[in-house]
């Protein structure tokens, strides 16, 4: 049901599950409060009703949560474990972002139904706040057995004052994890090291660490990146993946480590990756016109922008692609809108041949932020003018990489139409 009008009270619901987009001042929320209607946050409902029937594998971090969650769900599916999952994107292998395992027949309920917890549940564990009445991070409601801490840097400037505040939320979550579980932690992340140094009561396995999980050098073929996976220096398996870039190799390694902690043999986990088809809006090809590709990616933080561009650039070099890499960016996230990351934008876009930014709705100067890139960068406040400028600049062989965490005004279709 769309909207937040008070007439939705006519549904006479037994329980209202409230997401964090709902806020004070919305007619429906005010009416619910006035009637003292029973309410629960979405994360709390998950934690009380769905998750207790499962062995929970939760994936956290500033970047890569969706891809890593999708990878882990696919590994478990490919090795016969038929997981339930809730992911912040649509994995191409499943065609849906959420599923209750076919192995688990479960009626809708408002109370937890406990079982032998033999079915895995892969959940993307976000540090953003839970609801207007619960400002804790969402993941504090997810009683995970196996948790991936993928990376951590400052983000969500609209609710966190600094990185230390986010580290505190992560450590609150670490304190809830069981001694019988497993923490899978990126060994290259100083912020995560500080989180673990505060105390961990769950066995820790590091990835991207030579004494734990690590990868060998990557080699490329026409459509695959191939690399070896090691545990304590011993070869565990070989991965052949359509995903590109060092950041995705790290995501794969984290997923393999978590699957192994669950009980999947490492060589089987590695082999399963070859069947992974990616996630919508993660370097998704939206179309090609006259030899010009239009790609879509969710990147919206400078670190993710740089990693995505570098991954595409490496793929183009491997394929000896003659074209240019054109970046088209909408700084749309709450953190970006506040301008907190504006000083990092130019360096994050440096590997692109041309850069086009959309400045509509921003209260800071995007042109000034892109100025260090010189003549190869420009910003437009009008979306149609931006589309026209990109279409004029593109030539056969180019790849246009559109990056935004929103719909960007249907720019992908507009670009394809303008190029036709």
Image (cartoon, rainbow, N blue to C red):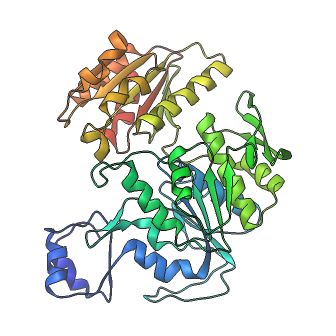
User: Which residue in the rendered view is the most extreme toward the right?
Assistant: 234
At 52% from the left edge and 52% from the top edge, which residue is drawn? 194
Within the image, what quadrant is residue 129 found in?
bottom left
| Residue 256 seen in the figure | yes
Nearest the eye: 82 or 335: 335
Location of residue 84 with respect to 388 vertically, above or below: below
Q: Position of residue 290 (x, y in %)?
A: 50, 19
Location of residue 15 with respect to 344 vertically, above or below: below
Q: How many labels does the image show?
A: 0
Task: Determine whether, in the image, residue 87 is placed left or right of residue 332.
Answer: right
Nearest the eye: 239 or 276: 239
Location of residue 283 with respect to 187 vertically, above or below: above
Quarter holding the N terminus is: bottom left
Q: Where is residue 32 in the image (x, y as percent from the top left)?
A: 19, 81
Task: Determine whether, in the image, residue 25 is placed left or right of residue 327.
Answer: left
| Residue 92 seen in the figure | no
Q: Position of residue 42 (x, y in %)?
A: 38, 73
Task: Determine whether, in the image, residue 199 is placed left or right of residue 233.
Answer: left
User: Which residue in the rendered view is the most extreme toward the top?
Assistant: 375
At 21% from the left edge and 27% from the top edge, which residue is drawn? 365
At 38% from the left edge and 44% from the top edge, which residue is drawn? 405
Nearest the eye: 396 or 78: 78
At 68% from the left edge and 65% from the top edge, which residue is drawn? 203
Quarter holding the C terminus is: top left
Q: Where is residue 387 in the image (x, y as percent from the top left)?
A: 31, 25
């Amino acid at each position: 049901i769309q909207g937040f009008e008070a007439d939705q009270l006519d549904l006479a619901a037994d329980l209202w599950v409230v997401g964090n987009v709902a806020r004070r001042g919305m007619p429906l929320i005010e009416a619910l409060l006035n009637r003292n209607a029973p309410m629960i946050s979405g994360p709390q409902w998950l934690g009380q009703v769905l998750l207790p029937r499962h062995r929970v594998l939760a994936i956290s971090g500033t970047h890569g949560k969706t891809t890593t969650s999708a990878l882990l769900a696919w590994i478990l599916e490919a090795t016969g474990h038929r997981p339930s999952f809730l992911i912040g994107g649509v994995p191409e292998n499943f065609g849906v972002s959420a599923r209750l395992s076919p192995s688990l027949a479960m009626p809708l309920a408002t109370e937890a139904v406990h079982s032998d917890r033999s079915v895995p549940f892969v959940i993307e564990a976000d540090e953003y706040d839970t609801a207007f009445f619960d400002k804790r991070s969402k993941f504090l409601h997810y009683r995970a057995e196996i948790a991936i801490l993928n990376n951590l840097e400052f983000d969500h400037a609209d609710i966190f004052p600094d990185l230390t505040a986010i580290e505190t939320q992560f450590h609150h979550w670490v304190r809830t994890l069981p001694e019988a579980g497993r923490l899978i932690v990126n060994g290259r992340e100083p912020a995560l090291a500080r989180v673990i140094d505060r105390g961990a009561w769950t066995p820790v396995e590091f990835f991207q660490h030579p004494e734990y999980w690590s990868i060998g050098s990557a080699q490329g073929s026409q459509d695959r990146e191939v690399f070896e996976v090691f545990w304590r220096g011993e070869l565990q398996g070989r991965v052949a993946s359509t995903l590109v870039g060092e950041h995705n190799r790290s995501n794969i390694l984290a997923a393999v480590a978590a699957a192994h902690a669950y009980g999947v043999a490492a060589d089987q986990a590695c082999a399963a990756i070859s069947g992974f088809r990616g996630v919508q809006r993660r370097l998704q090809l939206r179309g090609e016109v006259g030899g010009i590709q239009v790609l879509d990616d969710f990147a919206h933080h400078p670190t993710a922008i740089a990693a995505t561009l570098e991954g595409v650039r490496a793929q183009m070099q491997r394929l000896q692609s003659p074209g240019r890499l054109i970046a088209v960016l909408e700084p749309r996230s709450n953190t970006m809108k506040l301008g907190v990351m504006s000083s990092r934008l130019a360096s994050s876009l440096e590997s692109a041949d041309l850069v086009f930014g959309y400045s509509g709705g921003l209260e800071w100067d995007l042109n000034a932020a892109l100025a260090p890139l010189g003549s190869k960068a420009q910003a437009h406040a009008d979306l149609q003018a931006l589309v026209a400028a990109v279409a004029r600049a593109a030539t056969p062989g180019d790849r246009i990489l559109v990056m935004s965490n929103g719909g960007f005004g249907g720019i992908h279709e507009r670009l394809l139409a303008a190029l036709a």
